[in-house]
Image: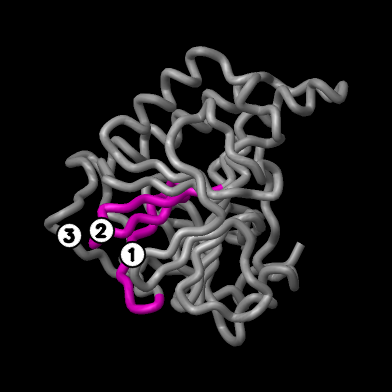
Amino acid sequence: MSAAERDAAGPACRSARIRQYPGMRAAADSTPPPAIPLNGAEILLDPLGALVWPAEHLVAMSDLHLEKGSSFARRGQMLPPYDTEDTLARAEQVIARWRPRIVIALGDSLHDRTGAERLQPSAFARLRTIQASRTFIWIAGNHDPDPAPLLGGEWAREVTIGALTFRHEPSRTAQAGEVAGHLHPSARLVVRGRSIRRKCFATDERRMVLPALGAYAGGLNVRHPALSGLFAGAFQAHMLGAARTYRMEARACLSD
């Protein structure tokens, strides 16, 4: 979203406050992302779609859907076979920017149960680099419910660290501190007569749903009941921009 688009959107769409953290900083050439509270923790939102928790030196990303293209090809629907490399490139950018000690992938990291067997050697090499010298945890998803030893790292159904619990699918009851994926939130608005739709974080500052990092992952509108119904009251959409995220009240977003 450009500055002009942000200005046209008015006060409903604005950048959150910026705060620096001495223990975990973005690379010198990066714009610091917004800082927001989440169940007592203070987190950052990376514009590529990852959650950053400086106090724990932690990065969480969701719904990589690696090998989605090859999965579709097996069923006769041909897509360009570059989604895995593109998705891993995004993950590499996040890791290089923050240099975390812990990385959590929130499920549906593979598009199907045999996705790891179709990964190319270059993809395995990139994964090993991403995992080097840090704890890397794969959370079970509905597309990849079982451990995939070929991927390396650790595997869990969910992980609780301090005030936050990381799992794939959001609970249907309000869970304070829950960080989940699965629903691929996106937000839509119209600026100067042009429709803009972007992946987004959805949060009421008690729980959060992360956008999908996967190149071929679609998006569910934040106004859809499956998403809006997770929050007891007002909640916000933090739309992904080229270099930062932009906060909007979800009620100001447009339905599809």
Q: Which residue is mark 2?
A: 54
Is residue 198 among what the camera can see?
A: yes
Q: Tell whether position 56 is magenta.
A: yes
Q: Depth check: 149 or 129 in front?
A: 149
How far apart are the two marked residues, 2 and 1, measured between alpha carbons?
Answer: 7 Å
Q: Which residue is mark 1?
A: 43
- Identify the secondary structure beneath mark 3: loop
Number of numbered discs visible in the structure rendering: 3
Q: Mark 2 near mark 3, Cβ–Cβ under 8 Å? A: yes
Q: Residue at x 36, y 35 (%)?
A: 93
Q: Earlier in the sequence, mark 1 or mark 3?
A: 3
- Identify the secondary structure beneath mark 2: helix
The amino acid on which the numbered mark 3 sits, given as a three-letter code, is Tyr
Q: What is the x, y in percent for residue 172?
A: 68, 75
Q: What is the x, y in percent for residue 236?
A: 52, 73
How far apart are the two marked residues, 1 and 3, measured between alpha carbons?
Answer: 10 Å
Q: Earlier in the sequence, mark 2 or mark 1?
A: 1
Q: Residue at x 36, y 50 (%)?
A: 59
Residue 53 lies, with reference to residue 226, above or below; the image says above
Q: For the residue carrying disc 3, how many other residues have a C-alpha within 10 Å: few (<14), some (14-19), or many (20+)? A: few
Image check: 40 left or right of 203? left
